[in-house]
Amino acid sequence: MIDERLLSLYILSKEKNYTKTANTLNLTQPAISHHIKSLEKEYNQKLIVKKGKNLTLTPAGEILVQYYDKFKSLDVRMNEDITNINSLNKFIDIGITLTAGEYLIPSILNIIIKSIPNISINFHTDNMEKIYKGVKNDVLDFAIIEGQFPKETSINSFLLAEDEMILVTSPSHTFKNMKKINRLLLQKERLILRERKSNTRTLIEEFLNNNGDSISRYNVMLELENINLIKELVSQNYGVSILPRSVCQQEIKKGKLIEVELEDFHIHRGIYIVYKNKCAYLNICQEIENVIASKKSFE
């Protein structure tokens, strides 16, 4: 039910060419031109300008494309709700960042199932920016995220737990018998870290920069998105890593990983539940706050 004129503008912003846009939408080029001119007349704004051989959006055009993304997300959600209106099952979509909720999922599941026994639960895992955007655009009912995120009046956030970044090594690593090491010693080691755009990686780099250091001084051997693979490689002594305590606590208890104190290195992060003011599952969000936040930290 999205305005086909907005769809034409959106595709044109990607293709930057009327002919390619027409082919993509299986329309004629005059039809695309008519859609754009109609929008420009309606909003009394120029939406597309030509720069060299390419077409580019004006500020007004960019605003309409941004709203198209929101309309598209709402349209998908609307169709899902209508499709499932006569179903006995209800659906809940929960966003979770890669390192935020691995050990919170069982508790969250328990709370939801007790509240709504016949519910179907979909967990969506991605980076913090995309998960937060999903809540903002009503694609996700609520989310569990870590680190810093925009504060907006339409979105509630509540601290569930305090986490910290720690240095972990293999039980056979030479650091295992040291009570504490410094960053100069760490610079000589092979580091296995999260990918550069991840929240945990950003926290590490910001801490180093704020303390007269730089990630460029360290031997970052591998950058991986998969946290379980990082833990496995560290346990086999391919390198050492700096990871949130919450994702390492089970391996540390089992002796598969060793925590080593890193001198003058203190990074703490919060794990939050975020949801819109008019969340359909407000009672579940509040129950998660009450149950999970009672611990406040990982041990």
Image (spheres, rainbow, N blue to C red):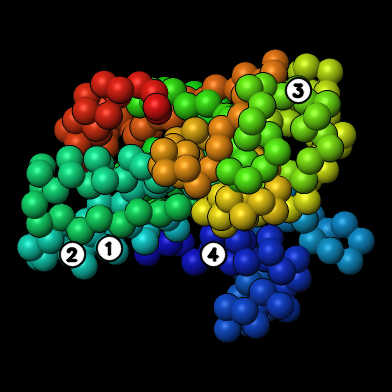
Regarding mark 3 in the picture, which secondary structure is present there? loop
Q: Which x, y percent locates residue 96?
A: 42, 45
Q: Say which residue label 2 marks.
A: 84
Regarding mark 4 in the picture, which secondary structure is present there? helix
Depth-wise, is mark 4 or mark 1 nearer the camera? 1
Q: CA distance from mark 1 to mark 2?
A: 6 Å
Q: Nearer the viewer, residue 164 or 75?
A: 164
Q: Dot 1, how many residues are within 10 Å of its Cα: few (below 14), some (14-19), or many (20+)?
A: few
Q: CA distance from mark 3 to mark 2?
A: 57 Å
Q: Nearer the viewer, residue 179 or 40?
A: 179
Q: Dot 4, how many residues are within 10 Å of its Cα: few (below 14), some (14-19), or many (20+)?
A: some
Depth-wise, is mark 3 or mark 4 nearer the camera? 3
Identify the disc placed on residue 7: 4
Of callouts 3 and 4, which one flags the residue occurring earlier in the amino acid sequence? 4
The amino acid sitting under disc 3 is: Asn
The amino acid sitting under disc 2 is: Asn
Q: Say which residue label 1 marks.
A: 80
The amino acid sitting under disc 1 is: Glu
The residue at 21%/28% (across/down) is 291
Q: How many marks?
A: 4
The residue at 18%/64% (across/down) is 84
